[in-house]
Amino acid sequence: MNTVTATQRTTPPTWAFLQQHLIKAMNEAGHLFLDKYTREDGTLLWREHWPGMDGSDDAYESFYTFPLFYALGGAEDYRYLARKQWEAMTWQFTEYGQLHREFDAYYDWMHHGESSLYFYFLALSEPYTLRDYQRSVRFADFYTGEDPEVDNYDPKLRLIKSPINGSRGAQLQMTAEDWSTHRWVLGHHIFPLPYEDIPGVPGPVADWEDDLVFEKILAVLNQRMAKGDVPINLLATTLVTHAYLYTGQDKYKNWVLDYLAAWQERTDQNKGIVPDNIGLSGQIGEYMDGKWWGGYYGWRWPHGGNVLLEALTVAGQNAMLLTGDDQMLNLARSQFDHLWELRQKIDDEWRVPYRHNDTGWNDYRPMSPELPVQLWHLSGSSADADRILRTGDPNRLNSTFSARGGNSDAGWFRFVNGHSPDYPEHILHTSYHTVAQALDEIRKDETDPKKVYIQHWIDKNPVICNALVQLTTGSPNPIYHGGLLLARLRYFDAEQKRPGLPSDISALIDQIQVKNSKQESFRLQLVNLSPIHYRKMYLQAGAFGQHNFDQITVGQTTDSVDGKWLEVRLPPATSIEMRISLARFVNDPSYDTPLKSRNEGQPMIKPRDPDINPGNISFSWETGHPINEEENENS
């Protein structure tokens, strides 16, 4: 492994102090959050009973940043806390009835995607633990068709059989109990009705808490929405990609590519627009009288095209990670371009439609730059940069500071392309104040835990990683409904043998210059704020080692590297500025790190097969294999 040593002694920049201050504040903040809302075993102080199919995603979302924070450089105890809280939420919501075999029994992939972020981040904090390795295979097989107990996928037609799916398979009918915890939300948040023509239910909104009204709505949902494939199921490609990163088995890569290709073919059949409902026969609009709109989380209901566009982007990112081919982003690109062609100038700004119903396209809004940022981050293409810049006034891009996410990645894009030089300080200040605000809310919260709604804890989690992701890894934040952390760079503490920045080390990536999907360069600044301690760290090119370091320039000296890992040494009170060139997408992605490798081997623990062991066969204590009849008599 090549080694670079810092020698420069200068006054540390303000952003470096702010970054360490934020990390140290969050090192303590999570404990206050847990002390307030959880029991000693990690379970939520909450109600005894929780019905319906909803809820586990919100529980996981309340703690999902814990493993990510540890992977970025948070305190060592977050490794334990992250594991503890995941296991506690999994146990608690299995007891409530939402989970089966440690995964949601059935729900949609907008919610599966939210809860799965936690599971994906655990692999960044503790790669190749046996439990998670085995879970990654089990969960992926729920969707690849390899689990005989779970009927989610039709491999011949390459479709997931229902929008409501999970570890108990595709649910082709929804019950009133499934929706019991959602009726209040749908009735009070003024969502439009799923359809304009529900018999006996005049729109555009209705009282979902009225039993007679809800009965009529549910009947139409089951008739038109419950069966067949929908675009948000593309978020399942992350779960299967996750299994590939663990195992390296081509069957998982092939499934991701085949499923994305199936949606590309359906889009081609539909004149370039992604249809949002596919029947069990593979026909577009099979239960919608041929209409390509009207599916679950589709172009009409409940949010319009927002989550649909996220799913297309996530699937394209996964496929590009697995192949290195930026053409995998074309399905998402085509929909952004199609909406842009439909734009209208309203109140002196360009707006695009986000919904389609029987009257045509509607719900015109300014196009968000956030998903095009995700495309540019992987491809580096000028066309994807244009998709960001055409979405609105540059002032809108400049003012998108948000500690919790939202529109913060557009501001990051401007920063790494030479604008908003105060962005690091601004976003770190914002993050610190948001942490402090969350702690104030925790201290003042006197609500009865048995009466709060399931989303009560999400915004009170004071472990907020958005700024750290952007500034240290040189990447936008993962797409919230199920994207991976597609970082340019990862850090590992060489002395503590753990992921993340070493104590007292601040990092900043800026001045990103992406030539194409295969070549890029950027500036990395590392600062050792300790005047006492010597630090040694490893850098990894890409979150999953998918890139290689090509050249490293320090001052006037340029060295060739040609590897995915680099060692950096920082004596006390030193800093280093490096111009790093990457050869992008040249390695097979995996969860390998400079500290742990897939080649170390992962055994699988398999359940007993009653057909093989009816109960009267002895097994070898040493090998676990059946003993033959003669050996059995001797034993």
Image (spheres, rainbow, N blue to C red):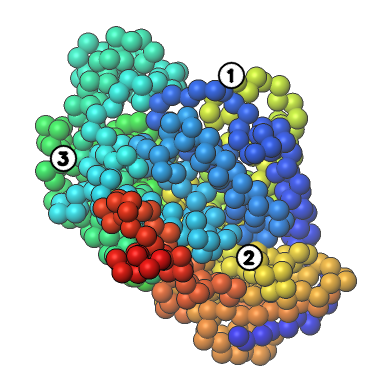
Quarter residue 215 falls in: top left
Q: Is the residue 12 above or below the residue 370 in the image?
A: below
Nearest the camera: 441 or 522? 441
Q: Residue at x 34, y 65 (%)?
A: 633
Using the numbered discs, state the Cα–Cα distance from disc 3 to disc 1 in whole angstroms: 40 Å
Q: Earlier in the sequence, mark 2 or mark 1?
A: 1
Give amino acid for label 3.
Answer: Gly
Residue 158: percent from left, percent from top: 20, 53
Q: Is the residue 136 above or below the residue 534 in the image?
A: above
**Label disc, if present, on residue 279 of the rendered structure:** 3
Give amino acid for label 2.
Answer: Pro
Image position of 533 (left or right of 560): right
Question: Of all residues shown, which one is farthest toward the front?
Answer: 634
Nearest the camera: 455 or 273? 455
Give amino acid for label 1.
Answer: Lys
- Pointer 1: what residue? 451
Q: Residue at x 48, y 24 (%)?
A: 50
Which quadrant of the figure contains the C terminus?
bottom left
Question: Of all residues shown, which one is farthest toward the right?
Answer: 532
Using the numbered discs, state the Cα–Cα distance from disc 2 to disc 3 in whole angstroms: 45 Å
